[in-house]
Amino acid sequence: MHRGLRWATLGLGLACTESAPRTERPELLPCRLEGLGVEARCGHLTVFENRSTQEGRRLELRLAVVPALASQPLPDPLFLLVGGPGQAATKAGPAVAEVLREVLRSRDVVLVDQRGTGGSNPLDCKNEEAISLAKRFAPRTDLTETRACKSALQADTTLYTTNLAMDDLDDVRQALGYERINLWGGSYGTRAALVYLRQHPTHVRSLVLDGSAPFELKLPLFVARDGQRALDSLFADCLADADCAARFPDARGEFERLLQRLEREPETTRLLHPRTGLPETLVVEREGLAAALLNLLYVPALAGLIPLGVERASRGEYGTLVAPVEAFSNGVDLSEGMFLSVVCAEDLSRVTEQEVTEQTQGTFLGAGWLSRLREQCAEWGAATLPEAYFAPVVANVPSLLLSGDLDPVTPPRWGELVRSTLSPSRHVVVPGAGHGVTSLGCVPQLIDQFLDTLDPIALDTRCLERLERPPFFTSLEGPSP
């Protein structure tokens, strides 16, 4: 979801940073990763939490290598950097590796749980209430919980920044014996890939960035404006679709009236939890509903439920929206503490109140959640980063940038901004797509071709032209036949 990004440090420079001395190759044992149809080999690499002093607490980084299917694989593997921040590569990455089977024929694919995620000393702040529908639709910032979580962690939370993590990643590269690597980044992972490129440029053969999150994004700041763009597009497309327009002639107006109603007074409803089947009493608030709808905009197939869901919610029937929101949220597993360490240091610290007003005014999300996140950051604390750290990454490295034209969080304008400082590069906007396009249509084949040729300009992207927004649901049975 709206998950930020991260770098920090104590004494690390902004160009090539020193990696730890070369270590022994980690022992890799056969393992199975959920979502991946072939066997991988899993292991750990130990690094210092404080890379600057090389003293104190050590972290075991969980990693997995998916061996190439070829008997003589190419020497440059593909490293997958996933999103959040807070997702674990060994959990979120296997589905990407499965989609990129053509790449896997000739190249190893490597997954490393970034420090603070998955099997790498996760900064988790989970509790049972987090899975309740009430928590999803009536968000609250419990600063006592935030404080307690930080105290319980065995971690200096200021040392879980992207630049440190990318030096960890270079240690993994060295330990596995790769000289040059290709990087695939998705969402926050695009930021991580850019940081690695800046710190270890001689070891990067190519970049594939899906949903670009450059330093200028200040992720929490622009979510409201970019989310509004996606919602406006949805309502416009509904009006342009004969079936949707006939069924929901005033979808935008109905949505705005629903938000105004909830703004005046939250509503209580009772329904069955889509996963547990247990009855729950749910208080629906304006901000909670708005955040839930933003989640649906990530996936156009789910966004197609919004006009129908809003119509039914206007009659007090919230179940049509609850099930897809729960499915989406349950599928995104984040280390909450890692998210805070990143966003507080790398994004929110650079956001002014004037910017908040400018970028949230008139949007369906509004500014309330940003204010609460700022309160959380005050409790969590953050690393202090040099201003030069946030300069754009300028490099000569073959780069393929991908964007979904309906993306509510990293829309195409950010991909175009990143493209302008990378060369040779190409920015491909996928029609009808939301957040994350690697699995769509012929995109996997384009990525494989790019990795083979390193020529983004020569790619024939006409195979994407037939893609379009999935149809709108006009009833609980689905789209009109």
Image (tube, helix red, strand yellow):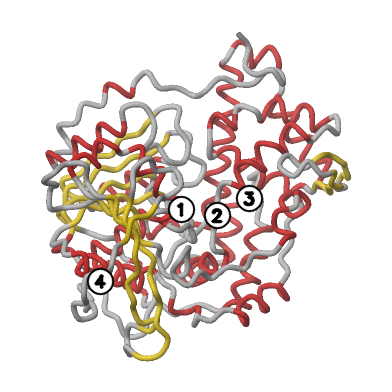
Task: Answer whether labels 2 and 1 touch (C-beta < 8 Å).
Answer: yes
Residue 294, image x, y percentages = 61, 43
**Residue type indicated by callout 2:** Asp
Task: Name the element at disc 1.
Answer: helix
Q: Work out how far the residue at label 3 is from the one at label 1, CA to CA, in angstroms.
A: 37 Å
Question: How dense is the environment of label 3, judged by Cα within 10 Å: few (below 14), some, or many (20 and up)?
Answer: some
Residue found 58% across the figure and 59% down from its top: 356
- The residue beneath circle 2 is 333
Q: Work out how far the residue at label 4 is from the one at label 2, CA to CA, in angstroms.
A: 26 Å
Left or right of residue 328, residue 465 in this image? left
Left or right of residue 156, residue 281 in this image? right
Check residue 361 in the rendering and tell me which mark sits there, or answer none: 3
Q: Is residue 249 visible?
A: no
Q: Earlier in the sequence, mark 4 or mark 2?
A: 4
Question: How dense is the environment of label 4, judged by Cα within 10 Å: few (below 14), some, or many (20 and up)?
Answer: many
Q: Quadrant of residue 126?
A: bottom right
- The residue beneath circle 1 is 91
- The residue beneath circle 4 is 171
Residue 298, image x, y percentages = 53, 40
